[in-house]
Image: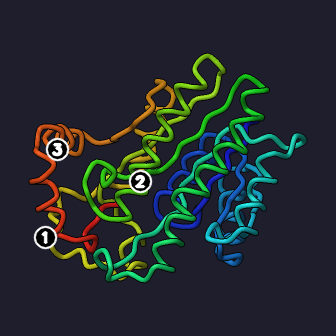
Amino acid sequence: MTTALITGSTAGIGAAFARRLAAQGHNLVLVARDTERLGEQATELHDRHGIEAEVLAADLATEAGITAVEERLGDPKHPVDLLVNNAGFGNKGRYLEVSMADELTMLKVHVEAVLRLTSAAAEPMRSRGRGGVINVASVAAFLPRGTYGASKAWVVQFTQGAAKDLTGSGVRLMALCPGFVRTEFHERAGMGTDNIPGWMWLDADKLVAAALADLARGRTVSIPDPRYKALMGVVKLTPRGLLGGVSSRTGRKYGPQ
């Protein structure tokens, strides 16, 4: 039986990955900051699907948290076959309205943690000749949207480059780029969502099913919804200056997950 490690597993997209993978019979390593929620999630998934669900309380905004997950990924006695780098958050406010400490924390979680955990997982996967990594980015990666969009753009570029370097190794890497998803993401960041049209919202469980299908197909970037694929096609044809103007007016308050 294979094992998947999911960061940010207790809510939103991470929880949807946990439900889907458990239903498919994968054992899980659930990573988040809240020990109580982790325990409740692990018990529920074990009782419902009969899989083993290990919990690892770790804050990826800290050195200790990243190191703990690196060590688990590198454990040769309990290999991880699929890593889902899902942990992330948004800051409310435009550039220079957010404190430098909060900006750096975002980069720690979105960039440093993703780099280190992907590397910690990919090395033993390459040695075994199989494995997969899904790095959760955002369609904001394709828009000029301050630190959040820049960090997610890094995730996409890094994942594509690493996937190319690992071609033929048996290790698949994919950047997942969702749009607005009905999760706790915006509430936790204190972001209003009243101005977002209903058709732009995605269901987390359907998104995860599409993402796993894209990984199986060998895609390195997944935009798992026809609506957002069409929107991103328009973005590619839109001058960057115009995109910047739109982004400046909307701010990060309405940035997608």
Q: Can you say whether 153 is above or below 182 in the image?
A: above
Q: Residue at x 59, y 61 (%)?
A: 9
The residue depicted at 80 percent of the width and 40 percent of the height is: 79
Residue where numbered disc 2 is placed: 152
Q: CA distance from mark 1 to mark 3?
A: 16 Å
Say what amino acid the circle numbered 1 marks: Arg
Circle 1 sits on which residue? 249
Query: Distance between the Cα atoms at labels 2 and 3?
Result: 16 Å
- CA gap between label 2 and label 1 equals 20 Å
Graded by Cα atoms within 10 Å as few (under 14), some (14 to 19) or many (20 or more), the crowding at tag 2 reads many
User: Residue 228: x, y in percent?
Assistant: 23, 45
Q: Is residue 41 above or below residue 48?
A: below
Helix, strand or loop under label 1: helix
Q: Residue at x 62, y 54 (%)?
A: 6
Left or right of 155, for residue 47? right
Question: Residue 225 is drawn in which quadrant?
Answer: top left
The mark nearer the N terminus, 1 or 3, is 3
Nearest the camera: 49 or 1? 1
Picture coordinates of residue 185 (x, y %)?
A: 41, 70
Under mark 2, the amino acid is: Lys
x then y, percent, for residue 10:
58, 66
- Name the element at disc 2: helix
**What is the three-letter code of the residue carrying label 3?**
Val
Q: Is residue 256 left or right of residue 208?
A: left
Q: Earlier in the sequence, mark 2 or mark 1?
A: 2
Q: Please rate how many residues cluster around mark 3, counting C-alpha atoms within 10 Å: few if below 14, some from 14 to 19, many from 20.
A: some
Label 1 Cα crowd, 10 Å radius (few <14 / some 14-19 / many 20+):
few
Q: Are marks 2 and 1 in contact (CB under 8 Å)?
A: no
